[in-house]
């Protein structure tokens, strides 16, 4: 298994970004030509930091489901929009170019984002086809296209259900200029890839309305999607098991919420 960090040269379009690949090797005994899905993992942290509990533990869990993974150390404050978006789009293109070396399917590159990382994943899902982003990266838009999205308790809207700290960190002094642009329920169209969303109803930090708004927009535009709302669970619950909580927070684990990743696996296999 390859876990050597890679520094991706952004060629001046944005600061260079570090990728942490978790890549499964093929077995001569089982299937030497196997091509696996690759999940680019975008941890949350309000665009102020990147949460460990939504990074490596998630990548390792994905390996157990037969997927390769790559955690993206995208830029946070004081960097502003669209720096992190450009980094993620470049990571998609880079991963696609590594399909043979990484034994992955170039048509199954999935973005998995949590909280503000969910906003970043959804941003790539709605903006990948914009020509000016491709031009900044010296790429063709199709190289930047994610094949699916997984959004866990995502930040989506700048409206009434907004997580204000995320947008303050993302936009800084330009919040009035870009607030409508980054309210992603307003940017959904048929360009968005199939999307799996989940949230907890009693999330006190990022209301479940964020996922509902995005799901309604997907439905209006005929984008295949699945939405799961679990009754209970704190914000930042990640895998919802004891692996992602210290002993003093073991009670925050929720076995009923932990099912989300198996539901996602089953959904992805049907695409």
Image (cartoon, grey):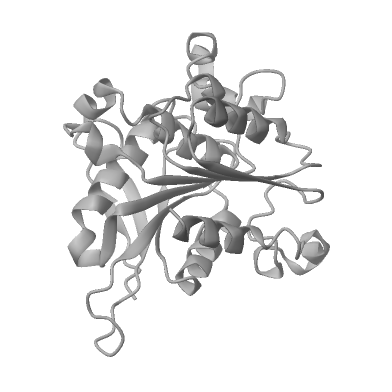
Q: Residue at x 72, y 66 (%)?
A: 246
Rendered residue at 31%/28% (across/down): 129
Task: Report the front residue among 124 and 20.
Answer: 124
Q: Nearer the viewer, residue 222 or 208?
A: 222
Residue 49, compared with residue 271, is above or below; it is above
269 up-or-down from 84: above or below: below
Q: Is residue 61 above or below residue 216?
A: below
Residue furthest to the bottom in view is 29
Image location (x, y in percent) of residue 93: 25, 44
**Residue displayed at 61% across by 28% down:** 216
Image coordinates of residue 257 in percent, x first then y, are 72, 58
Specify whether residue 84 is in view: yes
Total numbered labels placed on residues in the image: 0
Observer able to see residue 49? no
Q: Give the image location of residue 88, x and y in percent.
A: 36, 41
Which one is nearer the viewer's eye here, 107 or 210?
A: 107
Question: As rendered, which of 129 and 121 lies closer to the eye?
Answer: 129
Residue at the far top in the pictured view: 176
Q: Residue 117 at x, y = what percent?
A: 52, 41
Give residue 165's quadrant in the image: top right
Q: Quadrant of the N terminus?
A: bottom left
Residue 165 is left or right of residue 133, and the answer is right
């Amino acid at each position: 298994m390859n876990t050597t960090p890679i520094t991706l040269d952004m060629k001046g379009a944005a600061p260079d970004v570090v990728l942490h690949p978790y890549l499964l090797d093929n077995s001569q005994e089982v299937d030497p030509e196997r091509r696996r899905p690759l999940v680019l993992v975008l941890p949350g942290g309000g665009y102020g930091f990147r949460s460990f509990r939504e990074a490596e533990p998630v990548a390792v869990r994905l390996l157990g489901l037969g997927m390769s993974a790559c955690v993206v150390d995208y830029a946070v404050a004081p960097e502003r929009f669209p720096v992190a978006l450009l980094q993620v789009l470049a990571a998609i293109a880079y991963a696609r170019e590594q399909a043979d070396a990484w034994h992955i399917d170039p048509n199954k590159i999935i973005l998995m984002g949590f909280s503000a990382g969910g906003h970043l994943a959804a941003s790539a899902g709605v903006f990948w086809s914009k020509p000016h982003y491709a031009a900044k990266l010296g790429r063709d838009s199709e190289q930047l296209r994610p094949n699916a999205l997984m959004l866990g308790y995502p930040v989506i809207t700048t409206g009434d259900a907004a997580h204000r700290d995320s947008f303050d960190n993302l936009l800084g002094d330009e919040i009035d200029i870009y607030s409508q642009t980054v309210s992603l329920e307003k940017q959904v169209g048929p360009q968005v890839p199939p999307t799996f969303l989940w949230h907890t109803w009693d999330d006190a930090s990022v209301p479940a309305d964020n996922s509902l708004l995005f799901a309604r927009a997907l439905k209006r535009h005929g984008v295949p999607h699945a939405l799961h709302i679990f009754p209970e669970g704190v914000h930042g619950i990640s895998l919802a098991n004891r692996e992602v909580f210290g002993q003093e927070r073991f009670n925050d684990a929720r076995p009923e919420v932990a099912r989300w990743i198996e539901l996602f696996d089953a959904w992805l296999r049907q695409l």
